[in-house]
């Protein structure tokens, strides 16, 4: 009779042990899954941070490229302005020459007048050519200014994107620390 009770208690203890072992196995499974989830989450944050860093570097290179183009266009504008001033100086000089030649024509006789008229005509042609060059330079400057505005607009958009990416990167890094 006592042997039966002992066997019954042993059976109950075995049942309790089996339940606890099952419970421990479930807890171990939960722990393993939590560790795997944590590891994967950390990798995701690391990959996002790497991606954002690469994106920021790419956008920074684009900004450098736009800055170089901007400097190049400013150089063109400066060069064209200098050429415009040079052409304007030539035009003033040629107009002055025309006035002098006209005065000389009045002083000289008919014979020299034909040659002087040719000289005047040549100077007028030179003036017209220089005016055309001047207009071409001015239109080139306008085109460069328009391109500069486009580059500045693109540069602003890229800067805004970089700021957005840097903010996202900081958020990812702070969530990684948590």
Image (tube, rainbow, N blue to C red):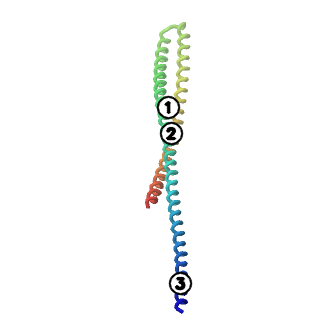
Q: CA distance from mark 2 to mark 3?
A: 82 Å
Earlier sequence position, callout 3 versus callout 1: 3
Residue ID at (52%, 78%): 17
- Which residue is the extreme one toward the bottom? 1
Instruction: Please provide percent x and percent y for residue 92.
Output: 46, 22
Mark 2 highlights which residue?
Answer: 65
- Decide: is 99 above or below 10: above
Q: Which corner quadrant holds the C terminus?
A: bottom left
Task: Please tell me how crowded label 2 is: few (under 14), some (14-19), or many (20+) other residues with Cα within 10 Å.
Answer: some
Residue 76 image label:
1
**Of 99 and 166, which appears nearest the observer?**
166
Q: Is residue 101 visible?
A: yes
Instruction: Please provide percent x and percent y for residue 162.
Output: 48, 49
Earlier sequence position, callout 1 versus callout 2: 2
Foreground: disc 1 or disc 2: 2
Residue 10 image label:
3
Task: Please tell me how crowded label 1 is: few (under 14), some (14-19), or many (20+) other residues with Cα within 10 Å.
Answer: some
Secondary element type, mark 2: helix
Foreground: disc 3 or disc 1: 3
**Of 39 and 76, which appears nearest the observer?**
39
Q: CA distance from mark 3 to mark 1?
A: 98 Å
- Decide: is 108 above or below 89: above
Q: Which corner quadrant holds the N terminus?
A: bottom right
Secondary element type, mark 3: helix
């Amino acid at each position: 009779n006592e042997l039966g009770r002992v066997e019954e208690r042993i059976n109950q203890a075995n049942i309790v042990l089996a339940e606890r072992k099952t419970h421990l196995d479930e807890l171990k499974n939960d722990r393993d899954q939590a560790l795997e989830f944590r590891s994967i989450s950390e990798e995701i944050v690391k990959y996002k941070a790497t991606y954002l860093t690469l994106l920021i570097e790419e956008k920074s290179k684009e900004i450098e490229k736009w800055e170089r183009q901007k400097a190049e266009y400013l150089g063109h504008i400066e060069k064209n302005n200098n050429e415009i001033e040079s052409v304007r100086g030539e035009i003033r000089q040629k107009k002055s020459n025309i006035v002098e030649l006209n005065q000389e024509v009045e002083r000289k006789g008919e014979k020299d007048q034909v040659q002087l008229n040719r000289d005047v005509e040549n100077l007028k042609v030179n003036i017209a050519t220089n005016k055309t060059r001047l207009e071409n330079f001015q239109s080139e400057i306008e085109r460069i200014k328009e391109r500069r505005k486009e580059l500045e607009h693109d540069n602003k958009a890229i800067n805004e994107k970089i700021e957005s990416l840097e903010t996202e990167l900081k958020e990812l890094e702070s969530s990684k620390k948590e």
